[in-house]
Amino acid sequence: MNRTRITGSKQASRRTVLKGLGALGAAVFGTATSVGSSAAVGDSAVYQYYHTDWTEITATLETVAQQGYDTIQVPPAQRSRLDRSHQNGVTDPPLGYQPVDLTDFNSVFGTEAEYEAMVQEAHNQGLDVVADAVINHMAANDDFRGAPGITFEDLPRFSERDFHPQDGINYDDPESVEDDWLVGLKDLKQESEYVRGELQTYVQKYADLGVDGIRWDAAKHVPESFFADYANQWADDLDLWTVGEVLDGDIGVCQGYADTGMSVTDYPLYYTMKEEAFHSDGDMQALDGAGMVNQSPFQAFTFVSNHDSGPPDYEKLAYAYILTYEGYPRVYSNRISVDDDDIRNLLWIRNNLASGGSQTRHVDQDLYVYEREGNLLVGLNRASGQRSKWVPTSWTNQTLNDYSGNAGNISTNGDSWVQITVPATSWVCYAPE
């Protein structure tokens, strides 16, 4: 696969372009693919915190910056139903995703003042902050592990008329996916001017606290028109980058939301990695051309796992892929420690070497070799033994250094070919010295 893309720069990063794109920009550009660009040098990665108090996050931000990340993603800040007394394991249930009051930012994770202090410290460390915004629904009215249900009367800023009628979701019906109640959560009427006003106030509050971006939770359950006509325009007016959680393996569904002017979580790539490429019985050939990242790389928010979706069998190998490939990658704190040495090295490689479009140089069941437009040659090997392969490159009679630390230097020949050797279940990252 040989794809030519416009190379970005630190002054025109993925987030900068998407901030300026907005819903109006999507209409002007036509489709997201017309924006097309590769990751720029300096366009790094997001570290996602989950179920972490604001003060705990603040204490780790210096390390996050030293690792080479450029952004953190943090849980929802608003007051919500459920707290840690209702937990049965780290991810059961997810806290912060059953809002009660979108204007009250004193939550299970800390106070509003602590949140603002966290944002300020992130900025002191040169990090952006992506806030998680729950705009599809409010809290459920069920009996959950001793937690009292939230009735319409318990919501200080909404009443029954602000919600769609209660009904379970039929995933074969797009209208039902958008308007019915997700796992019993009260589904807001985004078509209501009053509801939109409350949601805009919610986004404004995040902006007032200094955040740099918004993650739209459960975006697939909200009509595309809400993002195209309202939410992404609000964010654009506030100079906020946006990404929608579109939990769907269908690239067409994801692209539809991307076309409203935001990035989207690359679930098509995630499912390819988990079920095929990095599965113990998988095939690396599935990666060639896979996911949103190979269709709209500037709007692909790539990831290996999160609290909803577990990692593939070869988790670190998957991280080696997303951190050296196109897209905007996210690393999950519950699986990867803040000071992980492998990730730190991969982030250095990303920030210093991994720019330009991607070109597949070789792929078979166990070995995938790709080049980042004359800048970086990456080999991923999922086999239980080392693999060697001659591949073409952009360099003639050139010594290439392995920056992964997993192999020795190699040299291309007069025809620009080189023999690359990758250790078992590992990776190599070559670039000119």
Image: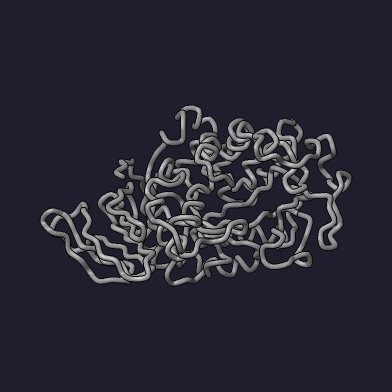
Quadrant occupied by the C terminus: bottom left
Query: Toward which corner of the image does residue 342 lie, by quadrant?
Result: bottom left
Is the N terminus in the top left, top right, bottom left or bottom right quadrant? Answer: top left
Which residue of the protein is positioned furthest toward the left in this rendering? 414
Most foreground residue, 409 or 310 = 310
Q: Position of residue 231 (x, y in %)?
A: 62, 37
- Residue at the extreme front of the image, as rendered: 281
Which residue is drawn at the image coordinates 17% and 56% (left, top)? Answer: 417
**Residue 99 appears anywhere in the view:** yes
Q: Return the x and y of residue 302 as percentages of the image width and height.
A: 48, 52
Identity of the residue furthest to the right in this view: 153
Question: Residue 74 appears in which quarter of the rendering?
Answer: bottom right
Q: Tell me, yes or no, if residue 22 can be seen here.
A: no
Residue 312 lies left or right of residue 211; in this view the side is: left
Q: Give left or right: position of 418 versus 211.
A: left
Relative height, residue 397 to residue 162 (above, below) = below
Left or right of 209? Residue 377 is left
In x, y percent, where is residue 107?
Answer: 74, 59
Q: How many marks?
A: 0
Q: How is the image coloured?
A: one colour
At x 51% / y 48%, what residue is drawn?
A: 266
Image coordinates for residue 101, horizontal then vertical, percent: 78, 49
Which residue is at 29% across, 66% downward?
Answer: 387
Residue at 30% over, 50% down:
360
Depth check: 102 or 188 in front? 188
In the image, residue 154 above or below residue 421: above
